Amino acid sequence: DTFMEEIKLAEGADQYRDLVSKLKHRFDYLPLHRACYFQSYHTLRDNIDRIQKITKSDPAACSKVDFLGMTPLHILALSQRPWLNLFQELLSVLSSVDIMRCRDVFGCTPLDYLCKNHSAKAVYVTKSLLPSILEPRMSFLGLNLWRDEVMSCLERVQVAGTTSLASEVESACENLEVYEWMEGVSLLESAVWKMKV
């Protein structure tokens, strides 16, 4: 409550009441977010059934964001009991794992939150999901050296402990982004060269 009191003093009473109201009604029209938020109170089977029912009636629910810019994957990643099966269920509805790169208003992705969440389940989920998130992007890299370097980073993630997990994941993602950028630049240079010839 002292945190909320500090916000109340810093933001003013009206803005504080507005923030509290937004937090109270954060999931009113986002049933998938609500299901993910309260997933720890239900069995895994009940959660999967609930997610399937919601996504069947609204396939776009997986990519909707709340007022904090969070997707259902952000909500799951912040849970103390993130289930790999629930992440896989949500990702199976989407045509791409790019949603894992979606940033909220704090600049964090679901993967960022998984890395900051030091529960044993979060570490397991991170290690299990990371290859499926990065490997499709790696297939577009032209040089085997670049793919090998990212694979090496992924291997370090698999043996990383809780304290080094975030830095190893960050290293893998940063390396891949650099190589993607370099690949783009080389393709652009090649296209410009061909135009001159």
Image (spheres, helix red, strand yellow):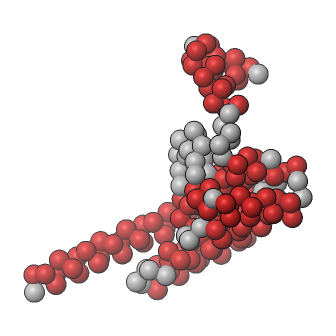
Q: Position of residue 176 (x, y in %)?
A: 48, 69
Q: Spot the residue most to the left.
A: 196
Residue at image position (53%, 77%) is 136
Q: Is residue 121 above or below residue 95?
A: above
Residue 7 in sight = yes
Q: Is residue 149 above or below residue 14?
A: below
Residue 188, quarter of the rendered image: bottom left
- In this view of the protein, which residue sits in the foreground, 42 or 11? 42
Residue at image position (70%, 22%) is 4
Q: Position of residue 150 (x, y in %)?
A: 54, 75
Residue at image position (53%, 50%) is 103
Residue 50, quarter of the rendered image: bottom right
Q: Position of residue 62 (x, y in %)?
A: 62, 58
- In this view of the protein, which residue sits in the foreground, 111 or 182? 111
Number of callouts: 0
Q: Position of residue 88 (x, y in %)?
A: 71, 68
- Looking at the image, residue 135 sits to the left or right of residue 48; the answer is left
Q: Quadrant of the C terminus?
A: bottom left
Residue 127 in sight = no
Residue at image position (33%, 72%) is 184
- Looking at the image, residue 20 sits to the left or right of residue 173; the answer is right
- In this view of the protein, which residue sits in the foreground, 191 or 26? 26
Q: Is residue 153 above or below residue 18?
A: below
